[in-house]
Image (tube, coloured by chain):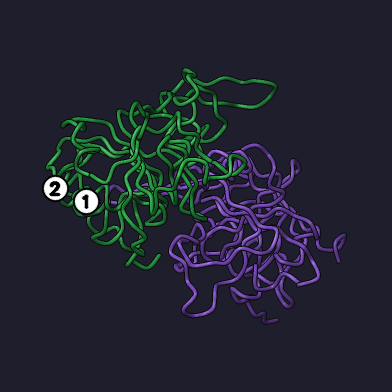
Amino acid sequence: MIDKSTASLREALSQIKDGSTIMIGGFGTAGQPAELIDGLIELGIKDLIIVNNNAGNGDYGLAKLLKAGAVRKIICSFPRQSDSYVFDEIYRAGKIELELVPQGNLACRIQAAGMGLGPIYTPTGFGTLLAEGKPTLNYEGKDFVLENPIKADFALIKAHQGDRWGNLVYNKSARNFGPIMAMAADVTIAQVSEVVELGALDPEHIITPGIFVQHVVAVGKKQLEQSA
Amino acid sequence: MSYTKLSRDQIAERVAQDIPDGAYVNLGIGLPTKISNYLPSDKDVFLHSENGLLAFGPPPAKGEEDPELINAGKEFVTLLQGGSYFHHGDSFAMMRGGHLDICVLGAFQVAENGDLANWHTGAPDAIPAVGGAMDLAVGSKKVFVTTDHVTKKGEPKIVAELAYPATGLKCVDRIYTDLCVIDVTPEGMKVIEKVAGLSFEELQAVTGAKLIDATATHA
């Protein structure tokens, strides 16, 4: 019998090694798997490459991981926010490497990895600083930039419900990068509010089929304390 | 003659007049967000948010905020009946794939050929952040820009060539400033409206790009 669900966050995270590339879901704090990130910090894993849309908010979740000095490099689209003071400080101190990626390129580079594609041509960023040094192509009169897939060792994502086969449904705009990150990592660990019985999720409504998910960790329905 | 600049709300109200019934629209952070306050209720305009919302609505009532229902500006919103949620891949397919009719963005500068700069000052100590601006610039059917006509120091923001790093090349279709509305065309920048009491010569004097007076044909 396959049961991907576990009550032990530590057990699910213990396979993550120093130096891993980890995709972390979320747009700001919505969809950020805060309990999984807290678990990473507790385990003291270091030298990480993190892929996320942002670079942390306040002292919460991802910002806490940065503050703990666990991250060597971050790949993201929008690090600078009104409450990104943790990132701002370590970036200005030269303690973290930043790869800035237009948000849609971040999404499609992750999707390319998940779909088994090689580098992809995208129109976004053509002629800008963020395309410097990258090969280009004119196709049917339009200019494109060649971008590499982004693959990860692990994806840590947040979903609403999951079952023991790893099928997931999400909650509102907390879905954001979850489904595509789950496809692009060797091992996807999803924290969910609730693990439900097999068959309880309507097959028409499953957003991430279990093939993309290796571990489902129930963390309860704790409400986000942070404001958006 | 004297003239009065448009307020930010008046600019937003003016843009709203150009958004047709049935349009799929992405409103950028800041002034463009205000446009939603001026969309008439008898029109169905579908507001898209890059973080996976189509047909989102006004802020929720106090006490009903949901931290997992936010817009691109990370403000609490609601979803209208008929609205939908989707992941980032689908969201940027809408943006990059030419499915959005209009996006409205802010700007540091717009060049005569329609090049847009709005993500990075290029200053050595600045922390760059780009978000979805470059995707909207290349992907939306129409790119509208709202901006003050000049900087706080009085320097033109509509220029011959960009001094800031570009967001997108030849992407801007129309500019709404506190002084005028400009169509960016292959023939050049055509002023189609300007505030009362402002002469074309006065407008040209505070603009770094060459303007064409097309107000008569649009009056």
- Between A1 and B98, the residue placed more toward the observer is A1
Crowding at mark 1 (Cα within 10 Å: few <14, some 14-19, many 20+) = some
Q: Colour of chain A?
A: green
What's the residue at 47%, 19% (across, down)?
A: A116
B163 left or right of B116 in image: left
Amino acid tagged 1 = Asp
State the residue position of label 1.
A38
Q: Residue at x 57, y 54 (%)?
A: B49
Which quadrant of the rendered structure holds the C terminus of chain B?
A: bottom right
- Chain in purple (letter): B
What separation in Å lies between label 2 and label 1 (alpha carbons)? 6 Å
B18 displayed left or right of A20: right
Mark 2 and mark 1 in contact? Answer it, CB < 8 Å: yes
Q: Can residue B170 be seen here?
A: no
In this picture, is A199 found above or below A154? below
* Chain letter belonging to callout 1: A
